[in-house]
Image: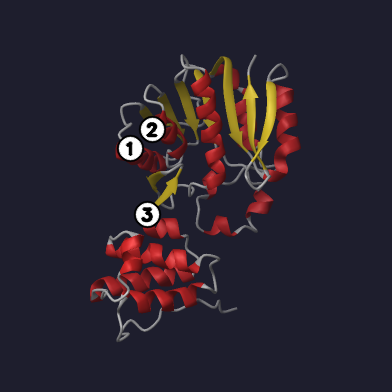
Amino acid sequence: MRQNVWQPANLMRANHEIGSWLQAAQEQLCRVSETPALEAQALLAHVLKKPRAWILAHPEAPIPAPLFIHLEQLLNRLMNREPLPYLLGQWEFFGLRFLVSPAVLIPRPETELMVETALEWFQSHPQRRRMADVGCGSGCIGIALASHLPELSVIAADISFPALQLTKQNAHLHHVESRVQPVQMDLLSALRCTFDVICANLPYIPTGKLQTLPVAKHEPILALDGGEDGLQVIRRLLENIRLWVKPTGLILLEIESSQKESSLALASSLLPQASIHCIHDLSDHPRLLTIQLP
């Protein structure tokens, strides 16, 4: 069966002004986006290398022909549902800008709950300043925390070398490269040291469910596939977690909203003396498993 693929508008439009392009792009993006105006503005600001405020204040400004062609190409990819952050090469997380690529997951607002929880714990434990960001991807969790905690030391671990390259770039971007160390390994298997806090945004989508989700078409399967029950990688981490976390340390695990009971049961069976809770995100979905060791 022939798949219907959206094709770009005529590249030889007579009017290449900002205002007219935004209007036309928004009308097209309405078919595939819940925020067509925002995405059109972000795309245009990226190509012109201008702030969005400038774009909106200069609707009569011309779009240079070479940039116009590039802009239409990006719009075509966006209309074919390629994620906007990958087209921009960057995305915001916890108030900071992070470089992203198809090698890593796009940072999401719900993951900020993990950063907020870790930050609150560190602030109440001023003598504890060592953490691991497991499955770090773009490095957004560890780098966001290092940006807010000047004495924090972070090991950023990932099995993907391209992901670690992005982590290194993002650490440099936010001037924390001396305190964020990217290390390629499976979970924390290469280390024989312990941490005050372990943050882990590991693959947690069940394999069978993953095949039905749009996210699997563009974002790395390695960072999404959590095995048959979605807890395969999390289980491997928890089975050996005492090797890597200090007494009275904190473990934070992002989970899928359907995994509240199963993840609580798993953690309780492996760490029966720990204090274990599940925190809901702003949409009231179970999102973050917190494990405080005795």
Which quarter of the rendered picture does the C terminus lie within? top right
The crowding category of the residue bearing disc 1, from other C-alpha atoms within 10 Å (few below 14, some 14 to 19, many at least 20), is some
Q: Position of residue 211 (x, y in %)?
A: 63, 56
- Residue at which label 1 appears: 174
Secondary structure under tag 1 reads loop
x 45%, y 20%: residue: 130
- Residue at which label 2 appears: 147
Label pair 1/2, CB-CB below 8 angstroms: yes
x 24%, y 76%: residue: 65
Which quarter of the rendered picture does the N terminus lie within? bottom right
- Residue at which label 3 appears: 89
Q: Nearer the viewer, mark 2 or mark 3?
A: 2
Residue type at mark 3 is Gly
> Alpha carbon of mark 1 to alpha carbon of mark 2: how far?
7 Å
Secondary structure under tag 2 reads helix
Residue type at mark 1 is His
- Drawn side of residue 134 relative to residue 234, left or right: left
Which residue is at the far bottom?
A: 14
Residue type at mark 2 is Ser
Q: Position of residue 81 (x, y in %)?
A: 50, 66
Q: Position of residue 53 (x, y in %)?
A: 34, 61
